Each structure stands twice: as C-alpha cells, then as structure tokens.
C-alpha cells in the first residue's frame, strides 16, 4: 500500500490544490495536517473553480473521505462558512465524508485581532501575514492554553479554558492600550455553533488506523511551502507551522512509516506573497508578464504575488530538507511566450560562490543569483497531456531543471484544469 504526501517546495501557491485533486482520483482519503485558512487551494474542474481554504482538496470528489488533522488550526466560523460555500456549488458535505480532529486547535477572534495588531504596529518588520490569526493560534497551542475542538463539549470546561487563554491575551492587549476581550459573549457564540462543529469531530489517529487496516490509500495535503516552514524557511518571514512532509505524521496521528512517497509541487518559476527575501525576484516587465499570464494574485487575500525565475538552489535545498521523491512541475504554460528563461544555479555572497541559501535573513537578502539561460519555446504548451508533445525547448528546460535539482519529475501541469496534466510516474504505484 502507498500513501503519498504532497508538499509545496517553494513559498506556497505552487498548485498543490490542482495536483491533490487530480491525484485524489486514486486516493480514498485526503488529509490536511497543518496550516489553516491561510491556505488557498484552487481547483478547476470542467470550467468550475473551487477555492478551498480549510477543506481538503478531495472534498469535491464523490466517495472520498476528507480529514482535517490535529495539526491544523481551525477558525470554527470560517470552517462552517466554507462548508456552506462549497455545498452551494453542488458538493455533498456531511459527517460521512468530512472528519475534523477533536484535537485540532481553534483560531478565535482574539487571535485574528492579535495578528492584525502585530502587523499594523510592526512597521518595516511586518511579515505580510494573511491576517487570519494563524501565528497567535499556534503560539497558544505550544503555550498550552489553547482551546481545542473537544473543549466545545462542556460549558464548564470551555469557561475555564477561555479564562486561561484570555488572561494571557488581555495582559498583552492592556499593555498595547487595546480593549479587553470579553469572555462571556465569545463563550455564548461558541456554544451556539458547538453542535455544528462537534458533529464532524472524531479521533483522527484512530480513523487513520482503521483506514490502514482497510488498505485505503491516503493522500496527505500540505499547505504553504517548505520555504515558509517555521524551522526551515526564510525565518522570520515564515508561517507558524512545519510545512515539511514529516509534519504529515504528527499533524494527523500516524507514524513516519505511513508515508511512502513525498511529492513536491514545484512551479516552473517562483512566486512569493508577503514580505521576506526572494533572491530571483523580477521587478521588471518579465516579472509583470509572469504575474499576468500566471494570474498571480493571492487566493486568500487577493494580494499581488511577487514573481521571479526558477530558483534551482532553493528547490534542491527544500527537496533534501523534506525528503521529496519526485516533483510535480506546474504552470509550465506560463513560460510559453518568453524568449529566454533562466534558472538560478548558485549564489554569490560577499564575492564568494555558494550552493545553498544561508539561514541568516541578512545573508538571504544579500545573495546574488547566478543564472543559466535557456532558449524559450515560443509556442503553446497549454493543455498538453503527453511529454512527447512538448516543444523540444520545453523538454530541454524540464530535463535540465530536473538534473539540476537532482530529482525525478513525476508530472507536469500545463493548465489549471484537472486533467491537463502529463503523468510521468504515478506516486501511488511507484
Ligand atoms: P496552491 O496554494 O498550491 O494550491 O496554489 P493556488 O491555488 O494558490 O495557486 C495556483 C494557481 O495556479 C491557481 O490559480 C491554479 O488554478 C493555477 N494553476 C495550477 N496549475 C496550473 C498550470 O499548470 N498552469 C496554469 N496556467 N495555471 C495553473
Ligand atoms: P497555500 O497553501 C502562499 C504566507 C503569507 C506570509 C506568511 C505568514 O495556498 O500555498 P500567515 O498568515 O501564515 O501567518 O502568513 O506566509 N502564506 C502563504 N503564502 N501560500 C500560502 O498557502 C500561504 N499561507 C501563508 O503571505 O508571507
Ligand atoms: Mg494557494
């Protein structure tokens, strides 16, 4: 039996949603294991677009089970809103096909407010977060004062948990001259929605054990990208969770030996949304062209994504950090019209050539990319489903890119549509 983990190998928005949806034709279960509704995963199926934030991308397929693991931070109102929104597009969602971990930590309104307060007062040091409360919610989780899905069962328990967490938040709010957050109104609102939330709540580790016994195929769906990982990313310009593949085990409740194949979703160029280092960023007309052709606007916040050349140094690094077995190369078609295309193959730092991104943010801001230039193919690859149908220069770009990052290409995506994908190696049967 094969279980596959999908992770983003860059700064997010690599096209994970499209690939997870495409692969989920083969999977029985799709599990989100980290992040929250900071994610925005887009699926395009027969011309209809679905934008998923918290719900696993398997939700749109019939007879699949979607799971939100303990590692995810869940805004309960955003969760219910998204279910409503996706249901309105004709997708069936009930406790039969959607499971929410009883141990998932909640994002509450004071987390969102704290995210906003910090971003608004940080000046130049702002992260450019999605302002969804992700960071503050994870802080409360490791601070052991968080409220989890299971805490909604008893009013007495909820009251006590809210007192604990608000003591912490109100001390900070007072120090910043902000209004005190009132417990009773929030408790009332949480108790009102509790039955709707608890209906999906289950011990996910136990369900995964059952799935394994039933020989079901599991697809773990990562959010964000490895360069946004709190340990391995461009810290402090990162998200507050571990986005690497090994997080799938802790974020759902199974061992690392449950993971058989790690698929890294990789854009054929690079984008980043929010602040932070980006060595191959293009602030010229080519960057603009990539943004326009690639429709590089944030799914969650509608912000314009920064665009740049493919950074082979970074992707080779994230492949090693996350144990990526193969990559799904996406958005190749966005490069169709370019005369020439570049790949960053090394950096210069203080006059010295280096082959990795240093950990210090000051160095990350200083590195100068060294490029290898490829001839463009100047013809459409949109919708191509067979490797041999790609123009010769596109084949060459893909092959050289794979050689440089020292990893196999598992698939190539040539449009947003589900089936416009070239399959080279099936992660479930490899
Ligand atoms: P995710 O966060 O990794 O799931 O990616 P997003 O959904 O935020 O952003 C990827 C965007 O690229 C979405 O609008 C997708 O519909 C689109 N997309 C995915 N694959 C391709 C592709 O191969 N070609 C083109 N042109 N667009 C793609
Ligand atoms: P998907 O799953 C791209 C970025 C934010 C910001 C940083 C921290 O769609 O790839 P946060 O709100 O998480 O505290 O913000 O991380 N970020 C993403 N960028 N794609 C995402 O998700 C992202 N989720 C968070 O822009 O720079
Ligand atoms: Mg996205």
Image (tube, rainbow, N blue to C red):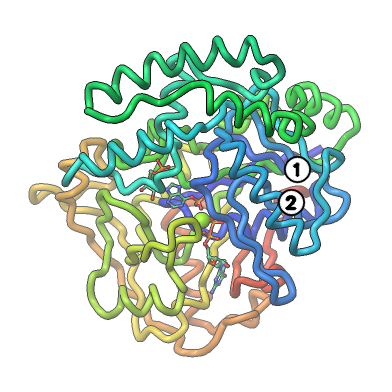
- Residue 261: percent from left, percent from top: 66, 42
Q: Which residue is mark 1?
A: 66
Farthest residue in the bottom direction?
Answer: 379
Q: Residue at x 47, y 83 (%)?
A: 336
Farthest residue in the right direction?
Answer: 214
- Please say if 213 is above or below 13: above
Crowd rating for badge 2 (residues with CA inside 10 Å; few <14, some 14–19, many 20+) = many
The answer to whether the beta carbon of the residue marked 1 is less than 8 Å from any atom of ligand 1 is no
Q: Which residue is mark 2?
A: 58
Q: For this rendering, which residue is in front, 179 or 222?
A: 179
Residue 206 figure quarter: top right
Check disc 2 and report its element: helix, strand or loop: helix
Q: Quick check: 224 left or right of 181?
A: right
Of the residues under marks 2 and 1, which one precedes in the sequence? 2
Q: Quadrant of the N terminus?
A: top right
Say whether marks 2 and 1 touch (CB < 8 Å): yes
Q: Residue at x 78, y 41 (%)?
A: 98
Q: Which mark is residue 117?
A: none
Q: For this rendering, which residue is in front, 153 or 373?
A: 153
| Spatial separation of the CA atoms under disc 2 and disc 1 | 6 Å
Q: Residue at x 30, y 68 (%)?
A: 372
- Residue 227: percent from left, percent from top: 39, 44
Q: What is the count of numbered marks?
A: 2
Residue 286 figure quarter: bottom left
Q: Quick check: 49 left or right of 293?
A: right
Crowd rating for badge 1 (residues with CA inside 10 Å; few <14, some 14–19, many 20+) = many
Check disc 1 and report its element: helix, strand or loop: strand
Residue 246 figure quarter: top right
- Residue 427: percent from left, percent from top: 70, 50
- Residue 428: percent from left, percent from top: 75, 48
Q: For this rendering, which residue is in front, 53 or 176?
A: 176
- Please say if 104 is above or below 384: above
């Amino acid at each position: 039996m094969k279980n596959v983990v999908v992770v983003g190998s860059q700064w997010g928005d690599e096209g994970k949603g499209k690939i997870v949806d495409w692969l989920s034709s083969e999977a029985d279960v799709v599990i989100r294991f980290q992040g929250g509704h900071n994610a925005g995963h887009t699926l395009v199926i027969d011309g209809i677009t679905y934008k998923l934030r918290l719900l696993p991308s398997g939700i749109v397929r019939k007879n699949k089970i979607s799971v939100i693991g303990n590692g995810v931070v869940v805004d309960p109102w955003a969760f219910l809103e998204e279910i409503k929104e996706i249901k309105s597009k004709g997708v069936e969602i009930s406790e039969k096909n959607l499971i929410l971990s009883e141990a998932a930590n909640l994002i509450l309104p004071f987390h969102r407010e704290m995210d906003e307060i910090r971003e608004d007062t940080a000046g130049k040091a702002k992260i450019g977060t999605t302002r969804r409360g992700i960071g503050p919610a994870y802080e409360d989780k490791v601070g052991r004062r968080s409220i989890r899905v299971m805490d909604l069962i008893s009013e007495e328990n909820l009251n006590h948990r809210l007192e604990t967490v608000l003591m912490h938040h109100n001390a900070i709010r007072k120090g910043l001259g902000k209004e005190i957050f009132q417990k009773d109104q929030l408790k009332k609102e949480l108790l009102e929605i509790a039955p709707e939330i608890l209906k999906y709540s289950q011990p996910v580790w136990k369900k995964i054990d059952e799935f394994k016994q039933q020989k079901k195929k599991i697809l773990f769906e990562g959010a964000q990208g490895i360069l946004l990982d709190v340990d391995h990313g461009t810290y402090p310009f990162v998200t507050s969770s571990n986005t690497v593949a090994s997080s799938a085990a802790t974020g759902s409740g199974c061992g690392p030996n449950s993971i058989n194949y790690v698929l890294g979703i990789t854009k054929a160029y690079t984008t980043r949304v929010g602040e932070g280092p980006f060595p191959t960023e293009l602030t010229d007309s080519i960057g603009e062209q990539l943004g326009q052709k690639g429709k590089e606007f944030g799914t969650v916040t509608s912000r314009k994504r920064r665009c740049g050349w493919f950074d082979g140094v970074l992707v080779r690094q994230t492949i090693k950090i996350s144990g990526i077995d193969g990559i799904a190369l996406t958005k190749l078609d966005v490069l169709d019209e370019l005369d020439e295309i570049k790949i960053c193959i090394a950096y210069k730092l203080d006059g010295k050539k280096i082959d990795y991104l240093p950990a210090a943010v000051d160095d990350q801001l200083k590195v100068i990319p060294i490029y290898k230039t490829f001839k463009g193919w100047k013809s459409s690859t949109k919708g191509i489903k067979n490797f041999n149908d790609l123009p010769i220069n596109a084949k060459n770009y893909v092959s050289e890119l794979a050689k440089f990052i020292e990893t196999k290409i598992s698939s190539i995506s040539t449009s947003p549509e589900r089936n416009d994908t070239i399959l080279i190696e099936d992660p479930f049967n490899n």
